[in-house]
Image (cartoon, rainbow, N blue to C red):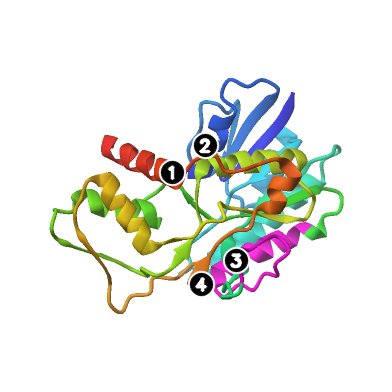
Amino acid sequence: MTRLLVTGASGFAAGWFFELFRGETGFELAGFSRTGGHPLASRWFHGDIRNYEQVVRMIGEFQPELVLHLAACADPTTPELLIDTNVGGTWNLLSACARLQHSCAVLLVGSAASFGHMLPTESGLSATRAARPDTIYGCSRQWQLEVGALFESLRVLQCRPFNIIGPGLPDRYAATAIALRMLRQENGTNFSVRNAAAVRDLIDVRDVVQAFRRILLSGKCLYPYSIGTGLGTSVLQLADELAEICGRQVRIQESAGESGQDRSAGLRSVADSADLQADTGWAPQISRKQSLTELVARLQKT
């Protein structure tokens, strides 16, 4: 039985990754996080990825063969915490895994924010495109990937998911924040959004975790696969689609004088996942409309 560990295991994407293995044999699942638990995990370790001793003890006890590293900080207002978690935490994990006496594969999950500004001449951002982060968050996620090259004894894999959506998405992300406001909005009123022209590649979380699994099992080492649909959606278009799903007739307009681009400053960010599809056979299966519809349905139940 293959021992598979997930760090940041109480998070949104981690929960869907565990669900991917429901009813499947051949894997022993474990989670590592500061809180929580999951019924599909046979082992759960509570700890902080920034604490080297805790990480070493957990790795030594579980002896993983596969690791999905999702533990990360996304708050751009705390640069010290960003670097300590995203860079230092990754170093702790890889250092601990390097002490194992057997082969271990570790998938480092970065962010599309490490690409930085997308040029008007670019149609999509692939693994071969140089990283040019323009925020401290993007820098920390890129440095996280680069740490992996220092551990030659491990099979280090890498990826950069684009903007994840889907049922259960926390309200700190734009799709859920807009949907919650839209559900409270009265028909015939004005509805303001920030960065209406900003374009993002929105991909369902279930497609993302399928990509994680395929990269872990058959991806190329030290190759930062982009995970996205290749389709760009503006914030204005996102708000329009959510208004339709929520059954609201509103006048959508951009908030004056607000940028809101803290974690990723680029106006446009779209993936090129052709190499991921070629190497692993992965392809997105869930449409944006289905993903947003199920996101709203989940919100209406809570």
The residue labelled by disc 3 is 123
Magenta residue span: 122-148
Name the spot of residue 175 as percent of width and height, x first.
Answer: 38, 53
From the viewer's side, name the closer residue of 45 and 192.
Answer: 192
Which quadrant is the C terminus positioned in? Answer: top left
Q: Secondary structure at mark 2?
A: helix
Q: Secondary structure at mark 3?
A: loop
Q: Of the residues shown, which amino acid type is indicated by label 4?
A: Gly
Does the residue at mark 3 contact the one at mark 2 (Cβ under 8 Å)? no
Q: Which mark is residue 266?
A: 4
Q: CA distance from mark 3 to mark 2?
A: 29 Å
Q: CA distance from mark 4 to mark 3?
A: 14 Å
Residue 283 in the figure: left or right of residue 103? left
Name the spot of residue 117 as percent of width and height, x first.
Answer: 57, 74
Q: Residue at x 43, y 43 (%)?
A: 166
Does the residue at mark 2 contact the one at mark 1 (Cβ under 8 Å)? yes
Q: Residue 224: name its quadrant.
A: bottom right
Dot 2 crowding, Cα within 10 Å, few <14, some 14–19, many 20+: some
Q: Of the residues shown, which amino acid type is indicated by label 3?
A: Ser
The residue labelled by disc 1 is 166
